[in-house]
Image: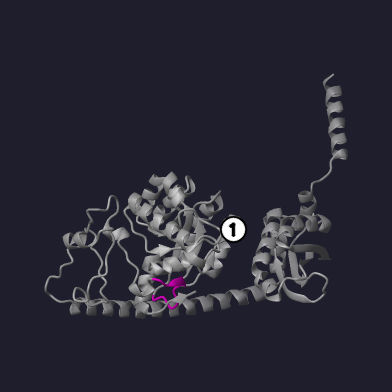
Amino acid sequence: MTSSIHHRSTRFTSSQKALYQPSVIELAQAGNCQALTYWMNSLLASQGVSVQVQPAAKHYLKIFVDFQPLTRKEVCISLRDRLVRFICYRLWTLNSSEIFSVQILARVSGSSRVLWQQTVRINTPANSQRLRQIRALHPKSRQESSFAFQFLRSLLLSSVTLAGFYIGYRLLYLEISKLLSKPSAAQPTTSAYLAHQMPYGTLQMLPNSVNSDEGIIRADSEAKVASVKLISAEIQGERVPKRFQGETVLQVAGHPEKAIALTFEDGPWPGATEQILDILQQHHVRATFFMVGLQIKRFPELAKQVAQAGHAIGNHTWNHPLQEVSLADAASEINDMEKLIYEITGVKPELFRPPGEVRGELTAYARQQKYVNTLWSIDAQDPYVSSPILIDNVLKQAQPGRIVLMHDGGGDRSATVHALPQIISALKQQGYRLITVPELLSGAYTAGAHTKA
């Protein structure tokens, strides 16, 4: 009886297998070019790009990327890196033993002329054995490459060490010179004097007679302002140099140190903002948060947490308008937001970032109010891409003095949360110091260089 039941069960399973139809993903994983073409087009068609996958040889594919006929040539070329990363990441997720290398060629639809091409090897666990076989065929060249790499790395490290020693020596010399040049007479820069002079809880510009360095002073770590409810003057009292007030800044060119500013916008947002704050605290990193008024109104405690953690806070308008506004509305968006930030956190923001691509009257009014219009030079594209691509977007463009755009609000930010620890660790391993935008601009003030839009 048992044997009979087992036999019927086996026949039923075989019947199921006979009727089974593989999915598009399963066919794509098996290297089926039609399935790969259908899958890629389902992902890219909305972006005005069509894809055609053809076999080139065993385990090798040709992928033709066709742009719409009206697409400008410079746009097609500028999208090269983004498309290559996108396609290769999708192929990597298949983990297929049938896809080892691809050649990606870009054309304008209807034309056979190739605008650009790139060959990429897809290294996955499924084809790792084939990669080892290829390496085994060329052991000598691999050893030579390894030796060249070791030599170049040693040379680079030696150069960096010498440069670091020289820069450290110069900075020490400048610090000693400043200390020796300070007048011995006590200056009126005590916390009581500052509290009297600073109604908003931020450092004010004082006459040159108080301090010879462009009239800028900084509070010591004990200076407190009575009207500030939460934040010490040391943390939120950073003022940007006067020369940047009313300017639009994308990055700091020629920054005196290897530093990058991480910025987050559209928050505070429950969950995402808290997780990002925890990650920043774990890595001892300070960042800049451009907040939206409606979000602060809904989640004031989150805004307070950002300020209490010592991060810089910028004005990102009250309603986050994604269309052009009148001058009167721009004034309301910025002024109401400034007042709210101060009421909740005790901070008077000096940084402004317009929402989306909106510029116009918002930027004009912010400039009139001496805000620093803070844009960015690295777009992580975190609302649109997965964590691996997000990480690559930041690390590939990392350079001293740059400003990174990310988001802690506006929707699901799990990709940002997952990518952030790796971004921070990788940048630190490369020798970068992660600082706030005011700190970055203060360094530019010393170096005498910045880049405006």
Residue at left 39%, top 46%? Answer: 300
Tell me residue 309's x, y (percent).
Answer: 35, 53
Tell me residue 37's x, y (percent).
Answer: 79, 58
Is residue 308 visible in the rendered image? The answer is no
Above/below status of 381 relative to 172 = above
**Towards the viewer: 147 or 385:** 385
Neighbourhood count class around disc 1 (C-alpha, 10 Å): few under 14, some 14–19, many 20 upward: some
- What is the tally of numbered marks visible in this picture? 1
Q: Is residue 251 magenta?
A: yes
**Towards the viewer: 323 or 151:** 323
Q: Which residue is the site of mark 1? A: 388
Tell me residue 320's x, y (percent).
Answer: 50, 55
Tell me residue 124's x, y (percent).
Answer: 68, 58
Residue at left 44%, top 44%? Answer: 298
Q: Which colour style is shown? A: one colour
The image quadrant of residue 385 is bottom right
The image quadrant of residue 392 is bottom right
The image quadrant of residue 349 is bottom left
Q: Is residue 149 magenta?
A: no
Q: Start and end of the magenta stretch?
A: 246-256
Is residue 76 visible in the rendered image? The answer is yes
In the orientation shown, which residue stands out farthest toward the top? 1
**Towards the viewer: 74 or 160:** 74
Horizontal arrangement in the rendering, residue 318 relative to residue 5 (left or right): left
Above/below status of 369 relative to 292 = below
Report the magenta stretch's main SS.
Answer: loop
Location of the N terminus by quadrant is: top right
What amino acid type is highlighted by mark number 1?
A: Pro
Q: Secondary structure at mark 1?
A: helix
Above/below status of 119 relative to 26 = below
